[in-house]
Amino acid sequence: MKISQSILFLCFLSLSFSTAQSSEGRLTPQAYIEKFKDSAIQDMLKTGVPASITLAQGMFESDYGNSKLAVDANNHFGIKCHKEWTGKTYIQDDDEKNECFRKYNSVKESYDDHSDFLRTRDRYKFLFELEITDYKGWAYGLKKAGYATNPQYAERLIKLIEENNLNKLDIEGEKLLGKKFSNDPLVANDSKNEKKVAEHKVTAVSSNNDLPFLKVKKGDTWYKLANENNLLLWQILKYNDATQDTKLYEGEIIYLVNKHNRSDVAFHIAQSGQSLRYVSQLYGIKLKKLARRNHIKQDAELKPGEKIKLR
């Protein structure tokens, strides 16, 4: 009897040790947040995707970094290959058998690709019109845009954000990273950047449609303009209906606050080479509102003599 009990006890110890071993090295929710929150904040600064949303998606999609896809492929967001992907791949079953997923050299690459994935696809474009602190709007918007098939996807993200107070990162990240533009490689070689004065702050008292604006000078970048006017990159891009890839032209008007929905001027007659965004900047009207009012696409090139309604 004693021998049997001893055997059972040894089996219990063996099972307990095995369980401890399998959990060893497994990331907890808090460990995951501490490890990857900086990447989420940095991507928020670059692209305007809320850090809370990025972290919550990473936690949910990767099982806090412990899923096989996360461990073997550094893929924390479940992003599949899609036809444009030319990098490494990882095959595993998902909605269907043997599906192709993106494989990254590091988790940081996965985070960067996730933000770019959202920023460059038309179906997610409407999300960037939301306030960066509107995590609920982002969560429901991601579900609406088809990011995941789980019917409770939005609610799961919101629960993760609220249980872990991730929404504070969106606010604190603005304050923390708003000071770091001068370290960005795109402006580091600009000796004038160290002065941070600025002529731009003087010209910013000019207004158009009662909106403060500045005019682009030679050598300006989006990062530099944001830094000199105490804005984050996502803010200045949003205010001007732009992306990081939008080129700046000397003398162009750049707004420092949200544009209006309409103008006091009734209409604009287009000239050769003008785009709808050009008109949007000229009169200080949101591009989306202007496009909707005139029933044309936001990236439309206008025909000479075309009449564009401004209100």
Image: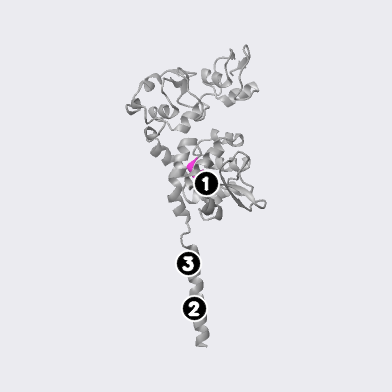
Above or below, comparing residue 289 to residue 90 in the picture: above
Residue 217 locus on image (x, y percent):
41, 20
- Report the residue at 47% width, 40% height from top: 43
- Residue in view at x 62 percent, y 48 percent: 100
- 304 in the magenta segment: no
Residue 105: percent from the left, percent from the top? 49, 47
- Element marked by disc 2: helix
Residue located farthest toward the left when viewing the structure as drawn: 195
Mark 1, residues whose alpha carbon is within 10 Å: few (<14), some, or many (≥20)?
Answer: many
- For the point 43% across and 50% down, the residue is 35
Q: Nearer the viewer, residue 273 or 104?
A: 104
| Disc 3: which residue | 20
Disc 3 or 2, which lies upstream in sequence?
A: 2
Stretch in magenta: 50-56
Secondary structure at numbered mark 3 = helix
Name the residue carrying label 1: 104
Closer-to-camera residue (216/212)? 216
Which residue ends up furthest to the bottom in the rendered image? 1
Marks 1 and 3, Cα distance to the nearest angstrom?
29 Å
Q: Which residue is mark 2?
A: 10
Q: Is residue 311 above or below residue 173?
A: above
